[in-house]
Amino acid sequence: MPLVLYRIDDRLIHGQVVVGWGRPLDVGFLVLVDDEVATSEWEQELYRMAVPPEMDVVFASVTEAARDHARYRADARPGMLLTGNVAAMHALVDAVAAADPAGAVRAVNLGGLHHRPGRVQRMRYVFADPAEEGELRAIAAAGVTVTAQDVPNARPVPLADVLSGRGDG
Amino acid sequence: MSSAGLPDGPARAGAAVGGPPPEEAAPAAPVAVIAAHGDLAAGLVSAVAQITGRGALLAAVSNRGRGPSELEAELRALVDAGPVRAVFTDLPGGSCTMAARRVQRDHPGLALATGVNLAALLEFVCAAAAGDEPGRAPPAADETAATVERALDRGRASIVALGGPR
């Protein structure tokens, strides 16, 4: 089964992911792709605690996630892949296209990028700096549909509307 | 303990007839933080204030619109600033809990409990108010942990299906 959601969210695992998306999509496993978390036992334990017992969580660096992508797709359970920033998702999209072309990423969900210095607010839950906006455009230019959508019953907002500031309209 | 299941004690003094409304009891520094989704934390503090007059013992934090670093910074500032010795959150896997765990890593004496409800908070606040006498030393971490555990027991016991089909 293909991964059912590729999500960029700086909170990584949290309520919207586990409950908001996890329940309706019947997600059986999460792939948390983050180079820092992948090397920290403490961080992994923190996120493992946040996942309900019926859901598995896999920690991977970008390189490891691209290498194991075909295996994730072969899992019979619906899975969700998370990155905490745009750069990691961009790198993953490119690496998967090379390592697992049959499973190339088709769509990316922009679920939450919050305020920090240098970022400009584009939607209620999307702030981005120029480099991040460039990376989002590059993901889209690779043929990937990028939409912002925090929860399943919200309207998916196309990237062009997000970056033009019309996303909350 | 009252027959209604609410703890008796100093926190109820403000409810006397002719006295100030409970919500207007004298302010005190927060000893616990409630961090939750949406307006839940503020709502719980409001409810505690209405019932006990001791809402000032709690600080409310919402994760709405906040990224993980902002949320952690707000919790850290509250814990660093004063006598906060416990954090209550709503969901085990929520961003408030994650942020609180990171703060707790640097404050090992901080009690952290998730899945909080009103009954648990009432128990905690009444116990905290009873120990809030002038000149009394703040409770040790293990004493706070025991208070939190009793509060959670009360909270769990308050979740009951009543009547209706079984």
Image (tube, coloured by chain):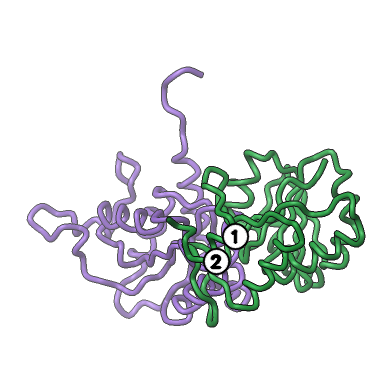
Chain colours: A green, B purple
Which of the pair B74/B123 is nearer the observer?
Answer: B74
* Residue A120 placement (x, y as % from top left): 51, 75
**Residues under numbered marks 2 and 1 in contact, where contact means CB atoms less than 8 Å apart:** yes
What's the residue at 57%, 69% (across, down)? Answer: B68
Q: What is the three-letter code of the residue carrying label 1?
A: Leu
On the image, numbered disc 2 is attached to which residue? A163
Report the chain holding disc 2: A
Write the residue at 88% across / 64% down. A64
Q: Residue at x 39, y 49 (%)?
A: B118
Horizontal relation, residue A48 to residue A118: left or right: right
Secondary structure beneath dot 1 equals helix
Per the image, label 2 sits on a secondary structure element best described as helix
- Residue B72, above or below B22: below
* Pick the front one: A51 or B2: A51
- Residues A86 and B45: in front is A86
Q: Which numbered marker is on residue A159?
A: 1
Q: Position of residue B134 (x, y in %)?
A: 29, 77
In space, the residues marked 2 and 1 are separated at their CA atoms by 6 Å
Kind of residue at badge 2: Leu
Q: Quadrant of residue A99?
A: bottom right
Asked if residue A63 is positioned above or below residue A147 in the image, the reply reads below
